Amino acid sequence: MDTSEIGQVQESFDQAVAHIEDLKSLQQLKVEYLGKKGKVTGLMKEMKNLSKEERPQFGAAVNETRNHITEIIEQKTQTLEAEALEAKLAEETIDVTLPGRNFSLGSPHPLSLIIENIEDFFIGLGYEIAEGYEVETDYYNFEALNLPKSHPARDMQDSFYISEEMLLRTHTSPVQARTMESRAGKGPVKIICPGKVYRRDSDDATHSHQFTQIEGLVVDKNIHMSDLKGTLELFAKEIFGEEREIRLRPSYFPFTEPSVEVDISCFKCKGNGCNVCKYTGWIEILGAGMVHPNVLEMAGFDSSEYSGFAFGMGPDRIAMLKHGIEDIRHFYTNDLRFINQFKVTEDGGAKNESI
Ligand code: 2NL
C-alpha cells in the first residue's frame, strides 16, 4: 500500500491554499479537492484496488487529509469574509466633514399666491373650498347653469370638446352645481371654487386658452343682494387695500338674475384717473349676481324658500393688476426670471407686494 499519494494531495492543497486571496478562488479550490470529482474523492475511489487489510489504514489516512483540508478551508473562509467586510466598510466611509450641498429655495407661483390669499380671506368668512373635475359633462358645465344647447351665450364660452357630451370646463361653475346637488335641497351652501378653466381662444397679451377662476356661492334662506355687496366690499379692501370702494353696474349672466359687474376704485390713482383705470377711476374685477331660480331648482333647491348669490373672478387678471404684469402669458411660460420675482420672505409673506 502506498500512502505517499495522499501526502502529495495534502501538500499540493497546502501550497495552493497559501496563494488564495479571495472567496471565489477558495470555493473553486474546495471543489477541486472535496467536490464529487475532486482529488480527495479520487483517493477514496482507489480503495477498491486495495486488500481488505490495507483498506482501514488507507481510509483513515484519507479521512485525516480530508479533515485537514476542510478545516483549513473553513478557517480561510472566515479570514477572507472578515477581510471583505473590512474593505467594504473602509470603502463606504462617509466624510462628514465635507461641505454640504446647497439647494436653492423655490418660490410660489404668483397665481398660487393670489389664489391662496383669496382662499384665506373667504375661509375667514366661514366658506369651504370645493374642487371638482376639469373634464366635465355638457350638463354640469352648461345645462345646469341655465345655458341650454341653443343658448347664444354658449358662443362666448367656446370650448375644447372631448366628445359631444364631454368638454374641458369653461368655468368653475360645474363644481358649484355639483356641490349644490349633493346637498339634497338643504342649505346653507357657502363655498369658494378655485381652479383651472379652458376656453377655445387665441393666446395674446390678455387671452389664454387656459387660465384660472375663483367662483363663490352662498345659498340659504334670506340671502339678499345686500349680502353680496357687503361680502364683495370686504373682499376688495382685503385684496386691494383698506380705502377701496366698490361700484355695481347692471349686467347679464345666464346663471344669475339680477346680474352685476363689480368695479373697485383705482388703487393706483385713488380715483383721479390713470393708465391702470383708463382714466375712469374704476377697475372692473368681477362679475356677480343673485343665483337664477332655474339654477337653484335644477340643483334640487326650492327657489321659493331658498335664494343665493354668486360671483366669479379671474385670479390672472387680479394678479396682473396687483403686480403690474402686462402679459398673461408670463404665468404659463415658466420663465424663472419672472417667477423668481415673487419669492416668499422668511416670515411667509410675498416680497413683491406692490400694493
Ligand atoms: C365673471 C362672472 C360669474 C357666477 C359667475 C355662478 C355659479 C352658479 C350659479 C350662479 Cl352655480 N352663478 N357663477 C355668477 C356670476 C358671475 O362670473 O366674470 N367671471 C370671471
Image: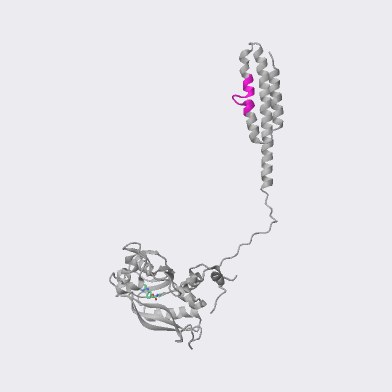
In the rendered view, how is the structure colored?
one colour
Where, by quadrant of the figure, is residue 164 drawn? Answer: bottom left
Where, by quadrant of the figure, is residue 186 drawn? Answer: bottom left
Q: Is residue 271 left or right of residue 344?
A: left
Bounds of the magenta segment:
31-43
Give the vertical position of 137 relative to 52 (above or below): below
Residue 37 covered by magenta stretch: yes
Where residue 73 sits: x, y (%)? 67, 30
Q: What residue appears at the point 61 percent right and 18 percent down from the top-left corner?
A: 45
Q: What residue appears at the point 66 percent right and 27 percent down from the top-left corner?
A: 70
Q: Nearer the viewer, residue 266 or 204?
A: 204
Give the vertical position of 47 relative to 189 (above or below): above
Give the vertical position of 80 relative to 137 (above or below): above
The answer to whether any part of residue 330 appears in the image is: yes
| Residue lying at the far left of the rendered structure | 150
Q: Nearer the viewer, residue 29 or 200?
A: 200
Q: Main secondary structure of the magenta part?
A: helix
Q: Is residue 45 left or right of residue 230?
A: right
Q: In terms of image quarters, where does ligand 1 lie? A: bottom left
Q: Nearer the viewer, residue 274 or 262?
A: 274
Where, by quadrant of the figure, is residue 10 drawn? Answer: top right
Q: What residue appears at the point 62 percent right and 13 percent down from the top-left corner?
A: 49
Q: Nearer the viewer, residue 144 or 80?
A: 80
Q: Is residue 305 left or right of residue 7?
A: left
Where residue 210 sits: x, y (%)? 43, 68
Where residue 52 sits: x, y (%)? 63, 11
Residue 221 covered by magenta stretch: no
